[in-house]
Amino acid sequence: MPSRKEIQWSQLRVGALVLAAVAVLIGLIFLMSGSSGGLFARKVVLRAYFQNAAGVKNGAPVTLQDVTIGNVIRVRVVPERNPTPVEVTMRVGKEFEQALHTDSTASISQAGVLGDSYVDLDSARATGPVPANNAELRTTGAPSIQDVIRTSNISIDELTALIRKLETLTDSLNSRRGTMGELVNDPTLGHKITQIASDLQTITSAIASGKGSLGKFVNDDSLYTRADSAVTRLDRITTDLDEGKGSAGKLLKDDSLYNRLDAAVGNANQLLTEVNAGHGALGKLAKDPAFAQKLDDTVTRLDSILTNVDEGKGSLGQFVQNPSLYNHADQTLDQTQQLVRSIREDPKKYLVIRMKVF
């Protein structure tokens, strides 16, 4: 039978073990509530209203810029707040109050695709005052896991349709339907491509070895020399032009040429002005209506004379149009020529001087 001392010692050990368990439990409670500043830390209650809870539960973390600052303490439905009837009540540590503003926003996010939902607060663009206890924060839409799954299903459907189209295209190519199918399945195509590659290799080899016009163009150093010489000459010419040498240089640099050209343009402009004003003989010729009438009458008369000549009227018209007159004139000239020739041959026969004395 144990002694009284042993019983007391056993009871002391049990009490110590219970105290240790209570201390560990308290420590765990402090650790679990550390995200909101501890069990006895001062806290601020905030509210936000969403269209749906999106998986948020009591105890879910509340973060600010991805830093945990509190927890969700209640999620309930408030029908009169339709279309955002889900009220999420949050409790955050008092020490984070200065980082929050009345225009801060709240949204529901997921920790990864299959992670738990939590409330994320955003104060990046907030400038309002610090929110009071039990204040309401504005909410912003955030894609829920259902939205992600729905979008993924749409993407999968589109990808499936694309795969079906690719299968149809592949079947068409393999069955030699259409132009592309014939191009892919034509056995002569590979031979043609090989022949083209061989020809290209032959051409490039010939060019690399300096054969042909193109090969000489690529490999002949004399072409570079001539091009360099041409560039040098061109540079020399432009230098001479810039220095005012030669006729072209003087044309570009000599101010007197510009002055003479400007004076010539001025004189021409003055001359045209005087002509337009009707001054001088040229101006009267251009502006005098009487002169224009006289010129028109003269042209009309000349046209009438030429018409009469062309019709054979008058002496000049007969001379131009009558062939017999031309023949008589030609015959007369011929006889006159013969007479002159005879006189030169025997002048005594035609030139006889007779003297009579009375």
Image: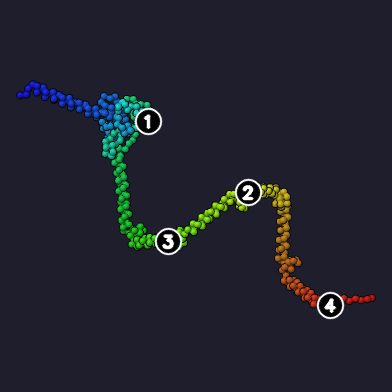
From what the image shows, is residue 60 above or below residue 241?
Answer: above
Amino acid type indicated by mark 4: Lys
Viewport quadrant of the N terminus = top left
Residue at figure coordinates x 30%, y 43% from the top left: 152
x, y (%) of residue 293? 72, 54
Residue at figure coordinates x 93%, y 76% from the top left: 357
Of labels 3 and 2, earlier in sequence is: 3
User: Label 4's element?
Assistant: helix
Comparing marks 1 and 2, which lies closer to the viewer? 2
Amino acid type indicated by mark 2: Asp
Q: Which mark is residue 348?
A: 4
Real-space Cα distance between discs 4 and 3? 100 Å
Q: Which residue is mark 3?
A: 209
Q: Is residue 53 visible?
A: no
x, y (%) of residue 231? 52, 54
Dots 1 and 3: beta carbons under 8 Å? no
Real-space Cα distance between discs 1 and 2? 72 Å
Disc 3 crowd rating (10 Å Cα; few below 14, some 14-19, many 20+) is few
Of labels 4 and 1, earlier in sequence is: 1
Residue at figure coordinates x 32%, y 25% from the top left: 133
Real-space Cα distance between discs 1 and 3? 73 Å
Real-space Cα distance between discs 2 and 4? 80 Å
Of labels 2 and 4, earlier in sequence is: 2
Comparing marks 3 and 2, which lies closer to the viewer? 3
Of labels 1 and 3, earlier in sequence is: 1
Dots 3 and 2: beta carbons under 8 Å? no
From what the image shows, is residue 69 above or below residue 275?
Answer: above
Viewport quadrant of the C terminus = bottom right
